[in-house]
Image: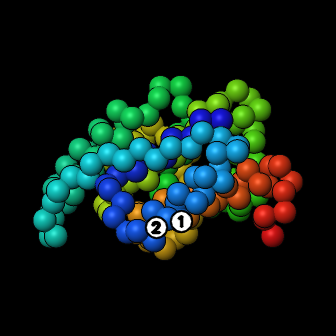
């Protein structure tokens, strides 16, 4: 399975990079997982509603340019469906079974995802009703993808 994780902005925190690198290394036994960073749109702290939409639109265009046309797209969004680790594993397993070898996860910037990206998504996934830093979500996501593959294989990692 080929899993690009398309995300907005550069990751600067060393501890997050180390955690992500560890899970990417572990995941290499199961799938080709790559992090694709698109530049975030520079914007002042205080934005009007129109300016926020413009920022999300520009970031969204960059995200959409990186999505393979035949990929199954899962967008991380607060309003998405919450799944257990087992349900995520089941989703990935079924996608592989039915020939969807490209599954793209999308993590938006600090303002979230544009409407165009959400429309392109085949499903929306929420990890919580809480808001998390998008950089931290990279680590949480790669850990959950790793956990999903361990569940699929019946390996002891998942408890």
Along the horizontal axis of the image, is 71 left or right of 93?
Answer: left
Q: Position of residue 40 (x, y in %)?
A: 26, 53
Q: Residue at x 72, y 34 (%)?
A: 96
Q: Which mark is residue 19?
A: 1
User: On the rendered image, what quadrant is the C terminus found in?
Assistant: bottom right
Q: Position of residue 101 (x, y in %)?
A: 64, 31
Mark 2 nearby-residue class (10 Å; few <14, some 14–19, many ≥20): some
Residue 2 visible somewhere in the drawing: yes
Q: Residue at x 45, y 62 (%)?
A: 17
Q: Nearer the viewer, residue 1 or 93?
A: 1
Q: Secondary structure at mark 1?
A: helix
Q: Residue at x 65, y 30 (%)?
A: 100
User: On the rendered image, what quadrant is the N terminus found in?
Assistant: top right
Q: Secondary structure at mark 2?
A: helix
Along the horizontal axis of the image, is 144 left or right of 53?
Answer: right
16 above or below 70? below
Q: Residue at x 39, y 35 (%)?
A: 66
Tell whether label 1 touches label 2 (CB within 8 Å): yes
Image mark count: 2
Q: Position of residue 11 (x, y in %)?
A: 36, 60
**Residue with the mark numbered 2:** 16
138 above or below 114? below
121 above or below 84? above
Residue 79 visible somewhere in the drawing: no
Mark 1 nearby-residue class (10 Å; few <14, some 14–19, many ≥20): some
Q: Which mark is residue 47?
A: none
Q: Residue furthest bottom?
A: 130
> Could you give the CA–CA distance between mark 2 and mark 1, rounded to whole angstroms?
5 Å
């Amino acid at each position: 399975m080929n899993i690009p994780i398309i995300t907005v902005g550069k990751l600067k925190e060393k501890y997050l990079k180390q955690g992500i690198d560890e899970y990417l290394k572990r995941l290499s036994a199961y799938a080709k997982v790559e992090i694709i960073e698109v530049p975030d749109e520079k914007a002042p702290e205080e934005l009007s509603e129109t300016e926020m939409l413009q920022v999300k639109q520009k970031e969204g265009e960059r995200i959409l340019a990186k999505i393979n046309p035949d990929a199954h797209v899962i967008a991380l969004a607060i309003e998405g469906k919450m799944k257990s680790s087992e349900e995520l594993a089941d989703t990935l397993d079924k996608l592989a079974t039915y020939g969807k070898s490209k599954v793209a996860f999308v993590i938006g910037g600090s303002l979230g995802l544009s409407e165009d990206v959400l429309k392109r998504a085949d499903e929306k996934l929420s990890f919580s009703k809480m808001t998390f830093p998008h950089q931290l979500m990279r680590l949480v996501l790669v850990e959950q993808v790793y956990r999903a593959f361990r569940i699929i294989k019946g390996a002891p990692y998942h408890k």
